[in-house]
Amino acid sequence: MNKPLLGLVLGGALGALDGLTALISAPEVKPEIMGIVVGSTGKGLVAGIVIGFISRKVNNLTIGIGAGIVIAALLALPIALAVDPATGKRYFWEIMIPGSIVGLIVGYATQKFGQPAPQRS
Amino acid sequence: MSLPDAALTHLRQVLRAPEPPADRYKIREPIGHGGMGTVYRASDRTLGREVALKVLRADVAGEDAAIRLEREARILARLEHPGIVPVHDVGTLADGRVYYVMKLVRGERLHDFARGVSRADALRVLQRVCETVGFAHAQGVVHRDLKPSNIMVGGFGEVLVLDWGIARIRGTPDGGGDEAAAPTLGAPSIAAPGEADTAPGVVLGTPGFMAPEQARGDAGQIDARTDVYALGAILRAVAGAGSANQPVPRPLAAIWNRALSPDPGGRYGSAAELAADITRFLDGAPVAAYRENIAERAGRVFRKYQVAIILVLTYLAVRLLFLAMRGL
């Protein structure tokens, strides 16, 4: 699988799972879970494809991982800063840390398991 | 008048050294000896480069040996592959001895190289040896003398299979009646009947790396699988060596055991098949020579994806940590 496609698939899948885990880490958000999962999946898809394209451009594991963390953290930041209207709480670290780990996983996986772009002669 | 010892030694060396066409090659020191010839480092004056010049040893020089060396040069010239030393020139010395000129290869023999590298690196080299030998097989050539000392690893990562002196072409008189499968190699001087090739019952090769059919002198049985046996012996010698602290993985041992089957039918069908199994082993994939149980399969999958698995577990641990913190 090429790197952008692998990033897209992995980002989407892990994003959806990341959204679903909110049921474990914050069960009171159950009424809004659909919105959380859709938003998290969308965020994962965007992060995944961007990470995939960066991984295709730069064949370097460290840069791939770093880009994964930064992009996922940037996309998670607005959500992490928002206050949950239902609970009146802000789940900053609960969103930022797992979201960044997901970016790390996508960055690592696209570099390690994605097919590099064919060399142009 | 008597000459000093040093002068006598020098004179002996000069007398032993071949005299190639004076206008083209200047012989330097000997760099290798084989059963049939000696390899010298030489300078090619015309092209201004260093080359290797192989010449028949004076004590074995004769019509048969000359034909053999010329045949070796022609085989090498036909096997155009990055893993095979290219031949530049063939000729005859003033004393009638045949010589050929090839690229001068600098590097380490496989047995020396393997001492200083990881098993995986040694296996990557063997993979390329198998691919080179597989190429030769596709051209109808069986090497028949594969061993670690006939494999050179260059300083820039090049891997070369050397010494094709006793290589056999399928379909030649000692070739076991494989005429139908014989490729069209062109020059009749390589494969023409009546040439000095291995007669039935004559044993050529190196003990320890020689397949049983080769050791028996059973020329009719010799084919690509004879080289597969030697490759298995090299694999065992190189990848199994120095393993006191590092046990040999069962799939790897199974690969060489299959290659070393006494029955040619039990071996890999070709060097390419052996290379494919080595590649699978290096990639952490299941190998054709070994049927693993569930625990072994789980262990292999974990080793292959251990970083990804650890990352996912870290993610889950973080989630659980936040859950636990909520309870505080």
Image (tube, helix red, strand yellow):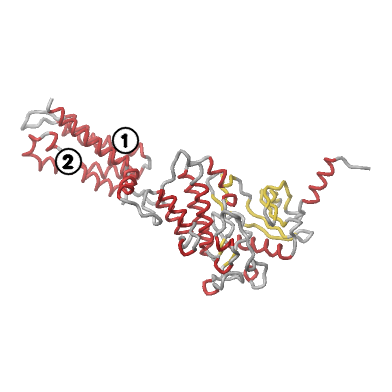
Q: Give the SS element for disc 1.
A: helix
**B288 is higher (above) or lower (below) than A18:** below
* Residue B66 drawn at (x, y percent): 71, 63
- Residue type, numbered disc 1: Gly
Q: Residue furthest bottom?
A: B180
Label number found at residue A27: none
**Left or right: B121 with respect to B286?**
right
Relative depth, front residue between B14 and A4: B14
Label number found at residue A40: 2
Residue receiving disc 1:
A66
Q: Residue furthest right?
A: B1
How crowded pointer 1 is (Cα within 10 Å; few <14, some 14-19, many 20+) is rated as some
The chain letter under disc 2 is: A
| Residue B91 quadrant | bottom right
| Residue A105 quadrant | top left
The chain letter under disc 1 is: A
| Residue B288 quadrant | bottom left
Relative depth, front residue between B285 and B183: B285
Quadrant in which the C terminus of chain B appears: top left
* Residue B174 drawn at (x, y percent): 61, 69
**Left or right: B174 with respect to A89?**
right
- Residue type, numbered disc 2: Ser
Relative depth, front residue between B251 and B60: B251
**A93 is higher (above) or lower (below) than B137:** above
**B177 is higher (above) or lower (below) than B207:** below
**Left or right: B313 with respect to B17?**
left
* Residue A108 drawn at (x, y percent): 31, 40
Q: How many marks?
A: 2
Q: Residue at x 50, y 51 (%)?
A: B235
